[in-house]
Image (cartoon, grey):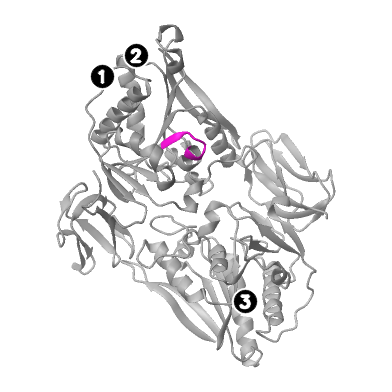
Amino acid sequence: MRRETIYEIKSLYRDDFRVTGFRFGSGEKAACIMGSMRGNEYQQIYVCSQLVRKLKKLEEQGRIRAGKEILIIPCGNPYSVNTKKRFWTIDNTDINRMFPGYDLGETTQRIADGIFQEIKDYACGIQFASFYMPGDFVPQVRIMKTGKENIELAKKFGLPYVVVHDPRPFDTATLNYNWQVWDTDAFSVYTTSTSAIDTKSAAQAVNAVLGFLSKQEILDYAGFGEYESRVVASHDFINVRMDYAGFFERIVGAGERVEEGDSLARIVDPYTATVRQTITSPVDGMVAFAHSEALAYQNTAVYKLIPEG
Amino acid sequence: MIEETITIAQVNLPVDEELKIAKHRMRPDVGSVKKLEEAHKRIGIVTGIHGDELEGQYVCYELARRIRETPERLCGIVDIYPAMNPFGIDNITRGIPAFDLDMNRLFPGNQDGDMNEYIAAEIIRDMEGTFLCLDIHASNIFLTEVPQIRINELHRDILVPFAKRSNVDLVWVHGASTVLESTFAYSLNDRGIHTLVVEMGVGMRITREYGDQLVDGIFALMKDAGIWDGEVAPMREPVVSYDEQAEDVYYLNAPVSGVFIKQMEHGSMVKEGDVLGQIVDPMSGKVLSEITAPGDGWLFTVREYPVVDEGSLMGRILKPHTET
């Protein structure tokens, strides 16, 4: 394992801003794993740290295939993590809306460029991503439909779902999209949580990535308990929205199977404890996403369900 | 003249509050107008999509004040939308605070989407039928701008003639970008509603002189459209930069992190080598970098917020060869 500084900027009053990478094996750029790019993505760093520990051991055991190199970047934005701010410290811009970056541009464009120059030539790119709404996910691999997406490869993670997503305009500036444009097979892996550490889904993600790397003949690793992935288009998800705002009392969480008519959650009047609405499942299916905050706004998609196919 | 405040989108918030997006409409009594078709012609003055950009607040106030001075001159409809993102204005925040979302990346919205997508869709729906819209921004809290209109190259042929009549100092036609397709202005122009994006002044402040200048321009646009038949001030001729290839402008990005002390004000003409400012280190008391003009031109943007990271924008200079 080699620990390297991938990119750095000097600051006026803080320690240098550093993006740190961990390299395993040597030779062909086989796989790159990217963790957090936003200040609230703790789980994404945590999963990378578990992979660093595991790959260090596998490397010592000689189980990384000859001529293959793996790079892990646990965090592309330590400044925001350390100050508990989601986006860039001064100007609140999102590094994951700046790809492929620009070396002469603004700060977050330069950071995106500094990272992208290091990682754009890898055959496979895996990013631990998060969603802008607060909530929990059923573990899934997301792949953006650019015409270059490789769905069969995505199934090799052995996670329950492969979600195929039509890019929206802002997606064109994300890492995942640009990786694909630069001919990397790119995947976003969602574990259950973002700003809380969920060890169970982290272990599942570590197993999924190591199993994937093994199937790609990058390392020798026997995975366990893999799923036969089901491929779902993101537009086939059923959004369950609330007609009212209030306190959100969750009955069912991500990863649970529900039947049509099952109660999913209650919306409660914060002053009188009156139940404003009990929302029920419109279909038989799997809870792919469940809202996780105490407050819920009107019209919020508090659940995303994958209908039984 | 008839005036009314109309709610265009409304949602209940969790604890004892409603979020309402409203507009103020000023229109003539139909019986008093000469041409009925013009009585239905609408101009929309929109601001507050970014909650920390306040220059448009004065424009909304001043426009209404001047119309009320001679209401008989109003021949069409003026819709004033002062606060598209009321949460942001209340929280001194560019985005939508509870969601950390840039509202200007949510358009055209979705009627069946979440609260913010729904509001965006309702705003677009309300704009339908508008002849001309001005979306007034104030750069951000970091940069001060001369009054200017920015136009996506895709809409240049339609919008440049309007922009030239709006009394700004600069019309900047820039290249298209997929990311910008989620903006309010793109969504409206894409629907055939002519929309000009105004950038002027600086975030969190009101520059009254710029507000007055733009209000003069709005009256000229209204007169051209037949919405106003009163006197209008003489218009200034803007510099027009057709910069689709991004070659007309020098961008000055900070070579080091530090505190930027500006020496030139925005709007200055500069010569190659002129010192625009310095980046200093207050800890050591040393100059870290002297910022000089890379070429002759017009400093139309300058940094207002002193702290810079490496890469932070400190200014923009328009090269002298552009069309006037």
**Does dot 2 land on a helix, a strand or a loop?**
helix
Quarter of the figure with residue B77: top left
Q: CA distance from mark 3 to mark 1?
A: 72 Å
- Which mark is drawn over residue A257? none
Mark 3 or 1, closer to the camera: 1
Identify residue for label 3: A50
Chain label for disc 1: B
Mark 2 touching mark 1, by CB under 8 A?
no
> In this view, which residue lies farthest toward the front?
B157
Q: Is residue B180 left or right of residue A300?
A: left
Q: Amino acid at mark 1?
A: Glu
Pointer 3 chain: A
Q: Position of residue B144 (x, y in %)?
A: 28, 47
Residue B295 location in percent, x, y?
19, 60
Quarter of the image with the C terminus of chain B in it = top left
SS class, disc 3? helix
Q: How many marks?
A: 3
- The mark found on residue B231 in the picture is 1
- Disc nearer the start of the sequence (2/1): 2
**Label 1 SS:** loop
User: Mark 3 and 2 residues: CB-CB less than 8 Å, in contact?
Assistant: no
The residue that label 2 is drawn on is B71
The span shown in magenta is B189-195
Q: Residue at x 64, y 89 (%)?
A: A65
- State the residue at coordinates (44%, 24%): B42
